[in-house]
Image (spheres, grey):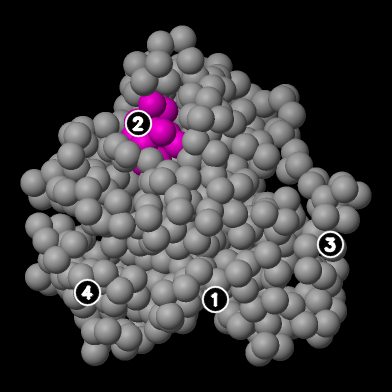
Amino acid sequence: MTEKMDPTSKAYLVGGGIGSLAAAAFMMRDGGIPGKSISILEAAPVMGGSLDGAGEPAGGYSLRGGRMMTTDNYECTWDLFKSIPSLITAGRTVYDETVEFNERHKAHSLARLVDDNRAKVPVASMGFSMRDRIELVKLANADEEAMGASRITDWLSPGFFQTEFWFMWATTFAFQPWHSAVEFRRYLHRFMLEFTRIETLAGVKRTIYNQYDSLVLPLQTWLAARGVHLVTDCKVTGLDHTTEDGKLAVTGIRCLIREEAAVIAVNGGDLVFLQNGSMTDASSLGSMTTAPRRLTKGGTGGWALWEELAEGRPQFGNPSAFNRCIAQSSWESFTVTLKNPGFFDAMSQFSGNEAGIGGLVTFKDSNWLMSIVLAHQPHFPNQPAGVQVFWGYSLFPDRVGDFVPKPMAECNGSEILRELCGHLRFDEEIFESANCIPCRMPYITSMFMPRARGDRPPPVPRGTRNLGFISQFVEIPDDVVFTVEYSVRAAQMAVYELLGIDRKIPAVTPHDKSPRVEFEALIKAFK
């Protein structure tokens, strides 16, 4: 444990995602650091990072995605949001309002998978052969060290990837067959409770609005009220550093603040927290008439700081393990704004679920492997009555569509809606006046790429004096990436270590060690 931070020192957080916002809150709540001593530097015009959500009825709403939430796990997330007041209900916390909302709107999907005949696929059985069961148990019980950088396909036979379980698990968590076997194994353990209810998504919890308005905005408001400096339009271009007693120490932050070059001095007792890597780097939006542009990390700089630090310093990890292959980490989402209830009414009649209850509907035979979800309405606070919003995504945007003769990556919003209508057998007139905004995300599952030991650094890399990492690309034993929880846990770990906070971090709940949960999972596997 390091010495406690001097209250007169300063902390700088590079990147304004949920991890940095959480870190600032932990510094104040648990470390006694005054808000005026904390600065969050964000290149975008708003805070929130990957948990974005914006728009209005005329121009359309857009969000890149939403992370799966649960109240049975996410120990650090709820430890934080039990301290953050609701912006909706006076006297309640964000945690309180989320629990109460989900008591009123319990998830129970009745149309989790749909086949190419527009029929709901029976999902009471996971569809496993005995070979699938044996291989899955072998993978789940394997030693991570022995697994190394292996892929899921190295452990499971081709038939497994045609099971009902795979289609549900893969689209719930966004796994691809070529992704990390270690990460897949961790998900099996961390979400063993969800294994037994994956067909209904009963364990999934939703926020009242999209996650930007329900999580980011109340947290940001709480920070701002306590004097935290929220600096937007500030692109950090480099970190100056020196080596003292064999430890790397950051001495300056080079940045462009509204295109004006500046250097922020980092003094002896100051701390710096860096978002190393970005799963939404190089994202681009399209429109009803244009497809999203094809961008890469070369033109955005989202990975550059980590790459610069890691060059010749293996203790900082290996960013190339994650960002080397866009074809294996890319997928595309889309947000649709509607001004008449026709589509929502038709989906309710088809699925048997009201909006906000059913969760993902996956078209399992679609070339794009398309899924959509109709959230409880309104999904945005400024969304007026008579306007509805839904979201969808596809895991294979490089494949030619079933009803549109081109890859999704080349499609505009109108063409994506045409493809969706084809799978549902809906007339295209149902989307008259709809606004579909597609979003290309070339690195969205980069954190799932096969990795070796050491490719992800710990939240406080060894050999550093005043630098912590907060992202989906740090190593946290037993926890799983692509979750809000991972970012918040990384933030709590980094802050507690660098500030010397003597408070126990909430442990990962060992659901996989429960005899009841293990027994129910075994029964489910043999259905």
Is 12 on the left-hand or right-hand side of 483? left
Magenta stretch contains residue 313: no
Magenta residues, start to end: 207-219
Q: Nearer the viewer, mark 2 or mark 3?
A: 3
Q: Which residue is mark 4?
A: 418
Disc 1: which residue: 176
Circle 3 is placed at which residue position?
523
Q: Amino acid at mark 2?
A: Leu
Q: Report if the CB atoms under discs 2 and 3 are less than 8 Å apart.
A: no
Q: Amino acid at mark 4?
A: Arg
From the image, tell me which residue sits under label 2. 217
Q: Which of the two marks, 3 or 1, is nearer to us in this view?
A: 3
**In the rendered image of this protein, does residue 97 appear above or below residue 287?**
above
Disc 4, SS:
helix
CA distance separating discs 2 and 3? 42 Å
Q: Nearer the viewer, mark 4 or mark 2?
A: 4
**Separation of marks 4 and 2 at Cα, in angstroms:** 34 Å
Which residue type does callout 3 highlight?
Ile
